[in-house]
Image (tube, rainbow, N blue to C red):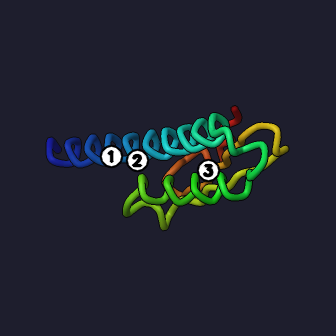
Amino acid sequence: MFLAFMLLATHVLVNLWVSSLVDHVAWDTARRAASDPRYASEPGQVQAEGLSWARSRLGGHADQVQLSFVGDPGGASVVAQSPLRRLGRDQIKL
């Protein structure tokens, strides 16, 4: 019984860590793009660099997470979709 409880607790903690990692990387990607002075003139380049940076930060989880920029080019919005997140799709807008 104790072992089952420890396995459940470990599973929950690891899922919480991965979920917060995905949230942090998506938020940081949007923040970095919004604060880049080139975003107004070259949004495509800044977005591509941001997504590349995000993939490198996610490491082995990058294959399971879909990040994309959405919305108007006046502000940076990142959508994170992942089976790692139980709530589904999150949008982070700056």
x and y, in percent, of residue 17 in the image: 37, 41
Q: Which mark is residue 18?
A: 2
The quarter of the image holding the C terminus is top right
Identified at 53% across, 39% down, the residue is 28
Residue where numbered disc 3 is placed? 80
x and y, in percent, of residue 21 in the image: 43, 43
Identified at 45% across, 39% down, the residue is 20
Amino acid type of the residue tagged 3 in the rendering: Ala
Identified at 35% across, 42% down, the residue is 12
Under tag 3, what secondary structure? strand
The quarter of the image holding the N terminus is top left
Instruction: Describe residue 4's horizontal placement relative to residue 24 as left or right.
Output: left
Residue 58 lies in quadrant: bottom left
**In the depicted view, which residue is nearer to us: 35 or 28?**
35
- Mark positioned earlier in the residue sequence (3 or 1): 1
Under tag 2, what secondary structure? helix
x and y, in percent, of residue 92 in the image: 66, 38
Residue where numbered disc 1 is placed? 14
Q: In the displayed structure, would residue 1 be above or below residue 51?
A: above
**In the depicted view, which residue is nearer to us: 50 or 82?**
50
x and y, in percent, of residue 7 in the image: 23, 48
